[in-house]
């Protein structure tokens, strides 16, 4: 089975009942993670969660099959979540599928979130034509998609969200559906809402618990760095420290903007003027008008191979931050300074 964010919601219930292996991929890491969480919540008996790393499966391709056929510590059910990069889990998945096809019993559900992979990757090709597997590809969402998703989240939590209220949550969380779900959950708790006793959300309630908007937090630094405005960098980094902005959260904002640039770059024709292209995207409501000037500047810098290198550098930095949290601020500062210098040089 195959799905995208457009039809995932419709495909998810059937997949949760019939599939054993799930492969979530695409440039929208937040969407892929949220989809994995949604499937896990839909499993009839999810039981214990077991986390595996793609690098471990690459080094030991039989580990996944062994874990998928093991019982939990308390002899109950389990499901496995794999965090992989690209096709790290390919050989492990191939071994698991061979065991299934040889009739060696039914494994527990395996959910793979594969950063930097697509539905054209080798692992996806192993799974896409199988009835007992789901491959779901997630592209960075636009504002309208996230707004509608937030309204659906609200319905499930017992919140009546108007379009403007849902859009406000979508913007405040930077179109990150994981953060949006967190905001909806907090709202439901604050208002004591439930599907049996729904509550209408007003601006006052959102003001009480709402996330700080990206304009107040991450985006000034994101835009200064990616637009190559090196003169602003020192002040923005100082503000980052004063506001105690989370380094990983800040990096996610960079990754979302890079994914948005990649999506725009894929639609922009050869030789097309970035400013004129972004203006057209704004008129088509695919770009928020307040973001248009910064996106125009950044798209003139980050295209093609340079954009690919940027995405790879952000992925490497993400791994480094998770592996060395004590030095996260230093690693982040050094990398952002380097990216800003590249952007400044490309604009000359």
Image (tube, rainbow, N blue to C red):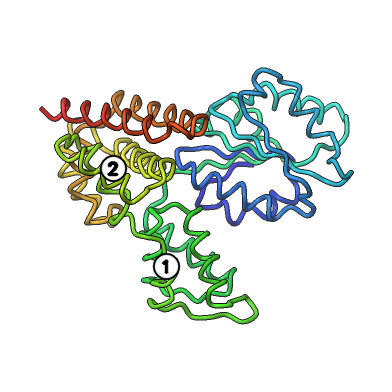
Q: Quadrant of the N terminus?
A: top right
Looking at the image, residue 113 sits to the left or right of residue 233; the answer is right
Q: Quadrant of residue 277?
A: top left
Residue 144: horizontal and vertical position, in percent? 38, 60
Asked if marks 2 and 1 touch (Cβ < 8 Å), the reply is no
| Front-most of residues 50 and 85 | 50
Q: Quadrant of the C terminus?
A: top left
Q: CA distance from mark 2 to mark 1?
A: 24 Å
| Front-most of residues 145 and 240 | 240
The extreme top residue here reads: 59
Looking at the image, residue 60 sits to the left or right of residue 182; the answer is right
126 vs 203: above or below: above
Secondary element under disc 2, as helix, strand or loop, is helix
Residue 160: horizontal and vertical position, in percent? 50, 76
| Front-most of residues 101 and 107 | 107
Q: Look at discs 2 and 1 and give the one toward the viewer.
A: 2
Q: Which mark is residue 249?
A: none
Residue at image point 42% right, 72% down = 208
Q: Quadrant of residue 261?
A: top left
Q: For mark 1, does the 10 Å Cα neighbourhood hold few (<14), some (14 to 19), or many (20 or more) residues? A: many
Q: Which residue is mark 1?
A: 166
Looking at the image, residue 58 sits to the left or right of residue 345; the answer is right
Q: Quadrant of residue 163?
A: bottom left
Looking at the image, residue 38 sits to the left or right of residue 280; the answer is right
Residue at image point 30% right, 32% down = 336
Q: Which mark is residue 222?
A: 2
Residue 285: horizontal and vertical position, in percent? 28, 57
Residue at image point 33% right, 51% down = 243
Residue 216: horizontal and vertical position, in percent? 29, 56
Q: For mark 2, does the 10 Å Cα neighbourhood hold few (<14), some (14 to 19), or many (20 or more) residues? A: many
Q: Give the mark nearer the N terminus: 2 vs 1.
A: 1
């Amino acid at each position: 089975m195959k799905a995208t964010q457009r039809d995932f919601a419709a495909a998810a219930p059937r997949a949760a009942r019939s599939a054993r292996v799930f492969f979530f991929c695409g440039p929208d890491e937040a969407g892929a993670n949220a989809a994995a969480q949604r499937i896990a919540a839909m499993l009839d008996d999810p039981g214990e969660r077991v986390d595996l790393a793609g690098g471990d499966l690459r080094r030991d391709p039989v580990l996944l099959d062994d874990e998928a056929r093991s019982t939990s510590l308390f002899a109950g059910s389990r499901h496995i979540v794999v965090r992989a990069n690209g096709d790290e889990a390919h050989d492990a998945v191939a071994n698991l599928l061979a065991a299934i096809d040889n009739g060696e019993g039914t494994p527990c559900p395996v959910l793979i979130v594969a950063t930097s992979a697509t539905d054209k990757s080798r692992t996806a090709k192993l799974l896409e034509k199988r009835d007992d597997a789901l491959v779901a590809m997630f592209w960075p969402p636009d504002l309208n998609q996230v707004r509608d998703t937030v309204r659906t989240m609200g319905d499930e939590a017992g919140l009546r969200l108007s379009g403007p209220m849902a859009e406000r949550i979508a913007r405040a969380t930077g179109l990150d559906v994981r953060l949006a779900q967190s905001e909806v959950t907090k709202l439901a708790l604050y208002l004591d809402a439930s599907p049996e006793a729904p509550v209408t959300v007003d601006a006052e309630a959102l003001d009480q618990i709402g996330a700080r908007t990206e304009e107040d937090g991450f985006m000034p630094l994101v835009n200064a760095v990616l637009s190559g405005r090196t003169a602003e960098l020192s002040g923005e980094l100082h503000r980052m420290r004063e506001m105690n902005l989370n380094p990983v959260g800040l990096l996610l904002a960079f990754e979302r903007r890079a994914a948005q640039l990649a999506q725009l770059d894929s639609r922009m024709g050869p030789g097309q003027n970035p400013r004129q292209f972004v203006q057209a995207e704004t008129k088509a409501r695919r770009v928020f008008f307040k973001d248009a000037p910064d996106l125009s500047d950044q798209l003139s810098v980050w295209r093609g191979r340079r954009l690919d290198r940027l995405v790879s550098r952000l992925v490497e930095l993400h791994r480094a931050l998770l592996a060395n949290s004590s030095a996260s601020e230093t690693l982040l500062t050094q990398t952002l300074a380097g990216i800003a210098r590249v952007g400044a040089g490309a604009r000359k």
